[in-house]
Image (spheres, grey):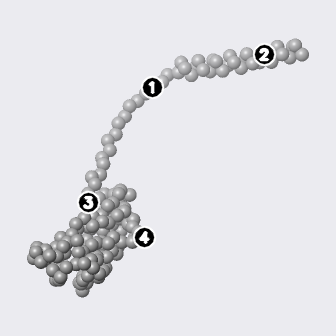
C-alpha cells in the first residue's frame, strides 16, 4: 500500500509541472493591442402631423356628438413612431360669438377609444402609406352651451403624443 501512495504522489507532481510550464509559455508569448473608433450619426426628431376633420354636414348643438376623423402623418422622421395618446390642447371660438357669451369650453374633443391606440406609423421614407393612419374620435358640445354659440366657429387644437418605434 505504501508504494501505491508514493506512485500517486509522483503522478500528481508530474501533472503539476506540465501545467506550470504551459502557463509560463503562454505568459511569455507576444501580445499586441489595437485601437479604433467610429462615428455614429443620430436622427433628429421631427414633429408628426395631425389632421382632424369633421364631416361637412356635421352640426354641433347642445349634447350633440359628431365623428371626427383624426389622421396621423409621420412625414419627416427617418424612423417609425408609435402614437400613444391624443389630447385636446385648447379650444377657441370666433371673436364675434365669444362676445355673445359663447364659451370655448362649450366644445370638447374626445379621443378615440383605448382600443384604437397605440397606432404605429412607419418611417417617412417607406412611401407605401404605412406612415399615414387614421383613427376615429368625436367632438361634443356641452349641454349648457349658451345661445350665443349658435352658428359659431370653434377651433380645437389636438396634440398627439408619440414615441420612437
Mark with earlier residue (3, 4): 3
Q: Which residue is mark 1?
A: 32
The Cα–Cα distance between marks 1 and 4, rounded to whole angstroms, is 59 Å
Q: Nearer the viewer, mark 2 or mark 4?
A: 4
Q: Percent position (x, y) of residue 61?
A: 24, 83
Q: Is residue 7 visible?
A: yes
Mark with earlier residue (3, 1): 1
Q: Which residue is mark 4?
A: 115
Neighbour tally class for label 2: few under 14, some 14-19, many 20 plus, Cα within 10 Å? few
Q: Nearer the viewer, mark 2 or mark 1?
A: 2
Which part of the image, by quadrant, shows the N terminus?
Answer: top right
Number of numbered discs visible in the structure rendering: 4
Q: Which residue is mark 2?
A: 9
The Cα–Cα distance between marks 3 and 1, rounded to whole angstroms, is 49 Å
Q: Identify the secondary structure beneath mark 2.
A: helix
Residue at image location 69% in from the left, 18% down from the top: 16
Q: Which residue is mark 3?
A: 47
Q: Percent position (x, y) of residue 58?
A: 25, 84
Question: Picture quarter containing residue 82?
Answer: bottom left
**Residue farthest to the right?**
1
Q: Which of 86 and 3 lies nearest the eye of the viewer?
A: 86
Residue at image location 37% in from the left, 34% down from the top: 36
Q: Are marks 2 and 3 in contact (CB under 8 Å)?
A: no
Q: Are marks 3 and 1 in contact (CB under 8 Å)?
A: no
Q: Percent position (x, y) of residue 4?
A: 86, 17
Q: Are marks 1 and 4 in contact (CB under 8 Å)?
A: no
Amino acid at each position: 500500500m505504501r508504494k501505491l501512495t508514493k506512485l500517486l504522489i509522483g503522478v500528481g507532481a508530474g501533472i503539476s509541472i506540465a501545467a506550470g510550464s504551459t502557463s509560463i509559455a503562454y505568459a511569455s508569448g507576444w501580445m499586441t493591442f489595437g485601437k479604433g473608433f467610429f462615428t455614429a450619426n443620430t436622427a433628429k426628431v421631427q414633429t408628426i402631423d395631425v389632421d382632424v376633420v369633421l364631416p361637412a354636414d356635421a352640426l354641433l348643438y347642445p349634447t350633440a356628438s359628431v365623428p371626427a376623423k383624426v389622421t396621423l402623418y409621420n412625414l419627416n422622421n427617418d424612423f417609425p413612431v408609435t402614437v400613444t395618446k391624443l389630447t385636446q390642447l385648447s379650444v377657441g371660438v370666433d371673436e364675434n360669438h365669444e362676445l355673445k357669451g359663447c364659451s370655448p369650453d362649450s366644445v370638447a374633443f374626445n379621443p378615440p377609444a383605448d382600443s384604437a391606440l397605440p397606432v404605429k406609423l412607419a418611417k417617412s421614407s417607406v412611401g407605401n402609406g404605412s406612415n399615414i393612419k387614421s383613427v376615429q374620435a368625436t367632438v361634443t358640445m356641452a349641454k349648457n352651451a349658451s345661445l350665443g354659440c349658435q352658428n359659431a366657429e370653434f377651433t380645437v387644437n389636438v396634440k398627439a403624443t408619440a414615441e420612437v418605434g
